[in-house]
Structures are given as structure tokens and as C-alpha cells.
Image (cartoon, rainbow, N blue to C red):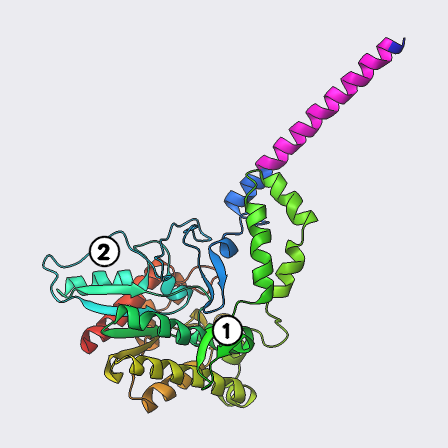
């Protein structure tokens, strides 16, 4: 009788083990499927894993993990700039124009064929102009970071021209993400934007999670680790200012409410121009460009956004004799009655057609500069 009970117990344990294995296997398949087609809950953490904390540029591309959140492979060199496998150039490429591009995710772009510098290179090639592009764009970079980035890159690259793309998100990043992280020398110059303490703590945790090949193990680590707590520590306090609050206000109210923040933003841009000049780049070879968001062109989701950010940049550029180009009017003409077709759905970025249109507009302006 005891032997029979032992067999039944062993069988029950065996069946329980099989059930647990089947459950874990099913959970693994479900987690991988949702990751592939969603994700509903992201367990790959590409948006964090592709960068590493930096006390000079806040965050820099991870040269060992050149993969974007959309599964698009990117390559960055040791200076944190995009590397392109091939670019269309004229048959005879003489005296290439060396141009250094600054910007955020709009400039960083996607695969090799879909970035502003690569599309501009293709656009110039049609006119027989050869361009040597240096793409220093990186997600969430802004003028506060452009300043130490320019101090680092310009002396090493020695570009003939610099092109800086600035938009609404840069105002927010400067004031509500990086302002308190700026390191200054004895003369008050911006020499670096430190990484947030939370980001430094979080990266080892993320690397530990990603080291597990099984997604059920990753989920367990998330549930039992400190990732969620650390994530909250690096998130911007949205109660300070929603990212596009200024853009939604009337111009008068926006300038009044954010007077100090606009002044800080403009000081960063002025310092950036001074860094270019210190490195012997003439004012006429410094170009600021502006891309509109969908809400600058379409009012389907509410009132049109104001142009206060662009006007703040233009004021500094004009004062310093620097060129500036606003693509809004040209793109409005190209986009016609359906501007939404040129942006990714539920995303602030241009889709591929929008990028081509923007690059063509900028290219036409830059050809006049060159």
C-alpha cells in the first residue's frame, strides 16, 4: 500500500513538473509573440540598452549594441556619430563638402537610407555636388548637449559647415532634463552634461535583465529586481511642464509663462554659436534648420501650435549673423490637404516620405548656401 502511494506521489510530482514546463513554455511563447507584435510589455529595453550614461554628453550610443528600438541596425563610430555603409555620390567626387550635423532623433534617423544627412547626400548628388556628411544626431540631444558635443567634435572633424536641427523637444530637454546636470568651468562655460544618477544605477540592472535569453526569466527579474523603482527615478517629472505645453499656448502667454526658460534656451544656442566661431567656422557657414510637427500644420486635433520656439532660435541666429531655415511653409505646400500621411501614426516623427520631403526642402536651401 505504501509503495502504491509512493508511485502515485511520484506520478503527481512528474505531472506537476510537466505542467510547470508547459506553462513556462507557453508563457515564453506568449512573451516573445507580444514582444514581436507589440510589445504590450517591453522586455527587450532597446531604447535604454542602445545608449550608455556619459558625464560629458549625458548619454552616448553603445558601440557594442548598434540596434534601434525598431530593430533597425545602426553603426556608430568611437565619436558617437553614425557610420554609413554606402552613400550615393556623383561619379566624380571632387572637393566634397564636409558638413557636421547636430540634432536629436530626427537627425539620428533610422537605417542608412533614412537619415537627413544620407538623404541630403543623395539629393546633392543629383546636382553633381559631393557631400561628406558627419551625423552627430542622437535621441534626446538638445542645445545644452550640443555645446560640449561641439567642443568635442568640431576640432577633430574640422567641418566646412555645421547644420543644427532644433525643435520643440529641445526646449523641454534643455530646461527640464539637463539644466541641473550641466557642468561648468571656472568661466561659466558648459563643458558637459552629466548622466543622471538614476540612469547610472539603471544600466547595470538592464544589462542583467537582457543577459537572460529566456523572456520568462527577464520578467521574473523585472518583478523581483529594482528596475521599476530605478525607472521612476530617471523619468522626468511631467508635473513640471508637459513636453509641448509651451507650443499649445497663445504666443503671448507662452512667452510670459516661460520667460526664464526661453532665456536659458537662447543662452545655450548663443554659446553653441560661440563654440563654432572659436573653432574658425564663419557665421555664414553655420545653419540652423527647423522641422515642423504635424500640429504646426494640421489643426485636426486642436488649435495649431505656435512658433515661439522657432522664433526664439531665429532671434539668436539673426543677432549673430547665422543662417536659419524654416521648412514649415515649403512642407505645407508639399503635404497639401493630408499632412498626416507624412508622419508616423501616434508618433511625432516624420515617416520615410516625410523625411524625403523635409530633406529635399533643406537640400534646396543648403545648395544655395554652398
Q: Residues within 10 Å of mark 1 (few under 14, many from 20)?
A: many
Residue at x-position 52% and y-position 80%: 246
Residue at x-position 50% and y-position 52%: 46
* Left or right: 285, with 105 as reference point: left
Which picture quadrant has residue 119? bottom left
* Left or right: 230, with 46 as reference point: right
Residue at x-position 42% and y-position 71%: 293
> What stretch of residues is rendered in magenta?
3-29
Q: Secondary structure at mark 1?
A: helix
- Which is nearer the eye, 76 or 79? 79
Q: Secondary structure at mark 2?
A: loop
- Mark 1 or mark 2, which is nearer the start of the sequence? 2
- Which is nearer the eye, 9 or 202? 202
**Quadrant position of the C terminus in the picture:** bottom left
* Left or right: 140, with 284 as reference point: right
The picture places residue 244, in percent across and down from the top left corner, at 52, 74
**Quadrant position of the N terminus in the picture:** top right
The picture places residue 142, in percent across and down from the top left corner, at 44, 73
- Which is nearer the eye, 332 or 112? 112
Dots 2, 1 in contact, CB < 8 A: no
Q: Residue furthest front?
A: 186
Question: What residue would you read off at disc 2?
Answer: 87
Which picture quadrant has residue 120? bottom left
Question: What residue would you read off at disc 1?
Answer: 173
The picture places residue 90, in percent across and down from the top left corner, at 13, 59
Amino acid at each position: 500500500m505504501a509503495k502504491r502511494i509512493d508511485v502515485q506521489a511520484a506520478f503527481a510530482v512528474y505531472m506537476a513538473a510537466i505542467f510547470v514546463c508547459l506553462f513556462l513554455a507557453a508563457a515564453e511563447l506568449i512573451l516573445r509573440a507580444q514582444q514581436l507584435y507589440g510589445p504590450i510589455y517591453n522586455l527587450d529595453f532597446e531604447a535604454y540598452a542602445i545608449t550608455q550614461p556619459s558625464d560629458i554628453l549625458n548619454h552616448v550610443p553603445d558601440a557594442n549594441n548598434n540596434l534601434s528600438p525598431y530593430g533597425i541596425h545602426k553603426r556608430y563610430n568611437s565619436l558617437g556619430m553614425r557610420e554609413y555603409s554606402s552613400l550615393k555620390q556623383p561619379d566624380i567626387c571632387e572637393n566634397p563638402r564636409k558638413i557636421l550635423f547636430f540634432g536629436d532623433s530626427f537627425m539620428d534617423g533610422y537605417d542608412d537610407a533614412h537619415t537627413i544627412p544620407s538623404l541630403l547626400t543623395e539629393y546633392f548628388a543629383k546636382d553633381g555636388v559631393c557631400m561628406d556628411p558627419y551625423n552627430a544626431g542622437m535621441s534626446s540631444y538638445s542645445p545644452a548637449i550640443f555645446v560640449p558635443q561641439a567642443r568635442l567634435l568640431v576640432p577633430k572633424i574640422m567641418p566646412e559647415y555645421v547644420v543644427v536641427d532644433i525643435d520643440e523637444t529641445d526646449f523641454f530637454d534643455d530646461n527640464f532634463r539637463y539644466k541641473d546636470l550641466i557642468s561648468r568651468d571656472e568661466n561659466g562655460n558648459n563643458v558637459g552634461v552629466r548622466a543622471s544618477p538614476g540612469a547610472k544605477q539603471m544600466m547595470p540592472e538592464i544589462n542583467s535583465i537582457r543577459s537572460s535569453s529566456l523572456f520568462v526569466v527577464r520578467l521574473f527579474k523585472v518583478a523581483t529586481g529594482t528596475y521599476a523603482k530605478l525607472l521612476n527615478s530617471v523619468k522626468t517629472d511631467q508635473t513640471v511642464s508637459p513636453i509641448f505645453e509651451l507650443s499649445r499656448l497663445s504666443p503671448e502667454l507662452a512667452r510670459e509663462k516661460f520667460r526664464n526658460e526661453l532665456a536659458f534656451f537662447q543662452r545655450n544656442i548663443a554659446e553653441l554659436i560661440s563654440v563654432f566661431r572659436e573653432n574658425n567656422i564663419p557665421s555664414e557657414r553655420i545653419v540652423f534648420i527647423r522641422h515642423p510637427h504635424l500640429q504646426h500644420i494640421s489643426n485636426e486635433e486642436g488649435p495649431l501650435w505656435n512658433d515661439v520656439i522657432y522664433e526664439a532660435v531665429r532671434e539668436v541666429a539673426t543677432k549673430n549673423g547665422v543662417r536659419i531655415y524654416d521648412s514649415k511653409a515649403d512642407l505645407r505646400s508639399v503635404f497639401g490637404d493630408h499632412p498626416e500621411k507624412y508622419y508616423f501614426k501616434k508618433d511625432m516623427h516624420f515617416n520615410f516620405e516625410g523625411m524625403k520631403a523635409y530633406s529635399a526642402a533643406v537640400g534646396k536651401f543648403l545648395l544655395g548656401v554652398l
